[in-house]
């Protein structure tokens, strides 16, 4: 095989990030902030530690990203009543107002990204990506 899978995935990730930035610009959200917002739209009130694990980034990245989202008025961080050492993250009313258009924009972007794939090809691609991710996690 002449192509390197890691290189091809890196190119795809870069293209996705650039296009995602365009999609998110109207919301004032950066591509790196999108996974955090998406997780909070799934489950509001998570701890910073839970978000860090779900988004698969370093704690310092989570802290920096949440500070930026807080400065934009999209989230609030409050002490965790169960563990005073951690904070829970909540969406603001402004962020709640963006929920439907944000989800629609991401859905449309996903449709554009996978436009050339039928259901079987898409499921196979997802399975391959998940297998590669698991292989890295198991190292």
Image (cartoon, rainbow, N blue to C red):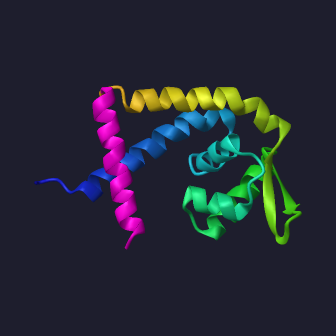
Q: In this view, does 46 lie to the left or right of 77?
A: left
- Residue at horizontal 78%, vertical 34%? 96
Quarter of the image where the N terminus is located: bottom left
Residue 123: quarter of image: top left
Furthest toward the left, the residue is 1
Q: Main secondary structure of the magenta part?
A: helix
Quarter of the image where the C terminus is located: bottom left
Q: How many marks?
A: 0
Q: Is residue 16 above or below residue 103?
A: below
Q: In this view, does 32 lie to the left or right of 74?
A: left
* Residues drawn in magenta: 118-139
Residue 99 visible in the snapshot:
yes
Name the spot of residue 85 as percent of width and height, x first.
Answer: 82, 73
- Front residue (pair 114, 139): 139
Q: In this view, does 108 lie above or below 59?
A: above
Q: In this view, does 139 lie to the left or right of 17?
A: left
Q: In this view, does 42 lie above or below 86?
A: above
- Residue at horizontal 89%, vertical 63%? 81
Name the spot of residue 50 as percent of width and height, x first.
Answer: 67, 60
- Residue at horizontal 33%, vertical 57%? 132
Furthest toward the front, the residue is 82
Name the spot of residue 114 as percent of width and height, x first.
Answer: 37, 31
- Front residue (pair 66, 79): 79
Residue 10 visible in the snapshot:
no
- 116 drawn magenta: no
Residue 100: quarter of image: top right
Name the spot of residue 27 as percent of width and height, x first.
Answer: 67, 35
- 137 drawn magenta: yes
């Amino acid at each position: 095989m002449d192509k390197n899978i890691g290189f091809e995935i890196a190119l795809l990730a870069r293209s996705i990030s650039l296009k995602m930035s365009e999609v998110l610009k109207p919301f004032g959200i950066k591509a790196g902030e999108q996974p955090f917002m998406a997780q909070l739209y799934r489950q509001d009130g998570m701890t910073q530690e839970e978000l860090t694990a779900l988004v698969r980034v370093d704690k310092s990245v989570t802290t920096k990203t949440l500070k930026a989202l807080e400065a934009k008025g999209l989230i609030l961080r409050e002490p965790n009543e169960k563990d005073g050492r951690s904070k829970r993250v909540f969406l603001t009313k402004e962020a709640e107002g963006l929920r439907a258009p944000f989800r629609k924009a991401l859905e449309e972007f996903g449709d554009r990204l996978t436009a050339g794939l039928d259901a079987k090809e898409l499921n196979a691609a997802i399975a391959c990506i998940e297998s590669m991710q698991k292989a890295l996690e198991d190292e």
